[in-house]
Image (cartoon, rainbow, N blue to C red):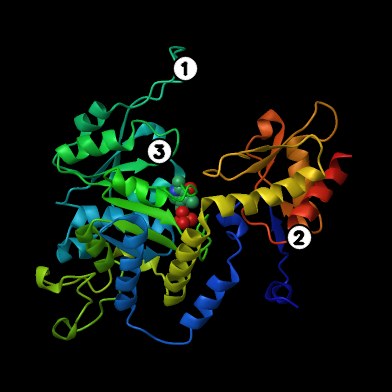
Amino acid sequence: MTVFDRLGVRTIINAKGPATRLSGGIMRPEVAAAMVEASRACVDIAELQAAASRRIAGATGAEAGYVASGASACLLLAAAACATGLDPGRMARLPDTGGMKNEAVMVRSQRNFYDHAIRAAGLKIVEVGLPDRYAGAGVRDAEAWEIADAITERTAAVFYVADAQSRPSLPDVVAVAHRHGVPVIVDAAAQLPPQSNLRRFIEEGADLVAISGGKALGGPQASGMLAGKRDLVMAAALQHLDLDVFWDMWEPPAGLIDKARLKGAPQHGIGRSCKAGKEEIVGLLTALELFITEGDAARHARWLGDCEEIARALPAATITGRDDTSRVPVVEIALGPKGIGATELCLALERGTPSIAVDPFLREKNIVLVNPMCLKPGEAAIAGKTIARLLA
Ligand SMILES: *Cc1c(COP(=O)(O)O)cnc(C)c1O
């Protein structure tokens, strides 16, 4: 009997990818084992975060790094850090940003549900650009000068969502932001693979980058990492760590927090709600190391093997991203005008036993997607056969 049997909760075959509503992905045994090991001893959590900072810096090329309970949590910490700097009074006042720089400039077309994290820290989003899809003159988007135009003395940060379709380019955004002395926060939660994206946004000049631990990295579902400038990571750490200590007895790790530069510390900052335990921190670092060791080519081959297993049962299916190791290969099942439709197929799979979650993203085109990222050995074959049976 598994823990889920005891709770009366069905397990599902996740052929959709690492979605939070499907409880994320499957951790490698090495990651789970590291988390169990971490659970068996107590450590100074700031010292552990300082070690995480060194590892994340090594993996990303950033000056420093930090671990919180998800990429979203890291974005909240990033926004808080940009608003307060190293001022403990400001840290204690958040999310009240009165008297602080409290605006985040953001390209309107990049607005998304996750930008709650920026607003939760007390920042107001100032949108720029008009992604015009209706005038018939081609899709326009924001230009770098529009970002510059929106920057004032109240601007705490420019917030940028990294994606293949993001406009303007990050280097162009960084250039205008830095010309005005404003840091750039990048949401790169789901930008892996390719592995080069661990370093890319830092290389392109981002001041803080948030990456999910529970997506392609294969770390704990409730983990994420922040990589960036030393002072900003220090400001994030100060608003996340439990600093309920006597000031004169407090000896934080110098690599993460330079106590000499502080006039005090907030006991619990706004990031307290973004807590990551030692198990998540160790799990994320273990997953990061495994992710780098495996490399894009081997990872792609592993995923492609599962896609091929599924496609074998489905003669009409195609595999996208087959020859591109920088992408996740995905099985595309285009459904004909007759027979079961995409929505029906997704629902029938979800309602079946075992329940199989696939991706309905292209259902308007009557296409069902099958993503191999969260499949366990043997599950690809079951998914392929089950879909073939429903199509017959
Ligand atoms: C998944 C995602 C997030 C949130 O990441 P978590 O690690 O689940 O907190 C934020 N932004 C984007 C673009 C995402 O895809």
State the SS at label 1. loop
Q: Which kind of residue does numbered mark 2 sit on?
A: Gly
State the SS at label 2. loop
- The nearer-to-camera label among 3 and 2 is 2
Residue 328 can be seen in this image: yes
307 relative to 20 in the view: left or right: right
Q: Which kind of residue does numbered mark 3 sit on?
A: Arg
Q: Which kind of residue does numbered mark 1 sit on?
A: Tyr
Q: Work out whether mark 3 precedes mark 1 in sequence or the reverse, and give the earlier one.
A: 3
Pick the residue in front: 78 or 272: 78
320 relative to 185 in the view: left or right: right
Residue furthest right in the image: 392
Residue 36 in percent (x, y) is at: 53, 80
Residue behind mark 3: 111
Please give the name of the residue rendered at 35% of the width and 66% of the height, measured from the top-left corner: 55
Per the rendering, the mark at residue 134 is: 1
Residue behind mark 2: 378
Bin the neighbour count of mark 2 within 10 Å (Cα to Cα): few under 14, some 14-19, many 20 and up: few
